[in-house]
Image (cartoon, rainbow, N blue to C red):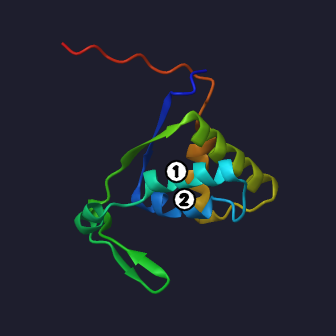
Amino acid sequence: MSEDRIIRLKMTLSERLLFPQIYPEKTNVLSAVLRRDIAEKVQLTQNQMELLGVKIETNRTTWNTKKDKTTTVGFTVAEMKFLKTRVDDMDKKEEIRDNLLDVILKIQDVNLDAKPKPKKKRK
């Protein structure tokens, strides 16, 4: 398996906003670096927030769901292993809440042993 392979997940805004709930509260240095790298990939840019009309209020974030298109986010194999391990830990400890289920299932569905699809040749 190629460690430099990129695994792409299509994610909605709500799934991206839920990612911090997957991260462990305390961890080692390597995992903290992976967590930070993942957080940078799923965070919203200021431009995206404006386009979606994101409003952050006390204990609540709202946006125009009609404008919420899926975004493809690329993860390294190491990042995906980190996420899959975390999801497995959460599952064993019965820590998976309903609001996390869709994003958890996407992570679980990733097959790290699958060979990457060959790139299409442009005509």
Dot 2 crowding, Cα within 10 Å, few <14, some 14–19, many 20+: some
Query: Residue 121: image x %, image y %?
Result: 28, 13
Which of the 4 image quarters holds residue 25? Answer: bottom right
**Residue extending farthest front:** 29
Q: Residue at x 32, y 59 (%)?
A: 68
Left or right of 122 in this view: 100 = right
**Residues at badges 1 and 2 in contact (C-beta under 8 Å)?**
yes
Secondary structure at numbered mark 2 = helix
Left or right of 86 in this view: 78 = left
Q: Which residue is mark 1?
A: 38
Foreground residue, 113 or 33? 33
Q: Is residue 1 above or below residue 57?
A: above
Which of the 4 image quarters holds residue 96? Answer: bottom right
Query: Residue 116: image x %, image y %?
Result: 49, 21
Specify the amino acid type for callout 2.
Answer: Phe
Query: Residue 67: image x %, image y %?
Result: 26, 61
Q: Residue at x 63, y 55 (%)?
A: 32
**Residue extending farthest bottom:** 58
Q: Earlier in the sequence, mark 1 or mark 2?
A: 2
Specify the amino acid type for callout 1.
Answer: Ile
Quarter that holds the C terminus: top left
Which of the 4 image quarters holds residue 113? Answer: top right
Q: Residue at x 38, y 79 (%)?
A: 56
Q: Which residue is mark 2?
A: 19
**Residue extending farthest right:** 93
Q: Is residue 64 above or below residue 56?
A: above
Foreground residue, 16 or 81? 81
Secondary structure at numbered mark 1 = helix
Query: Residue 39: image x %, image y %?
Result: 50, 56
Q: Nearer the viewer, mark 1 or mark 2?
A: 1
Q: Residue at x 59, y 48 (%)?
A: 34
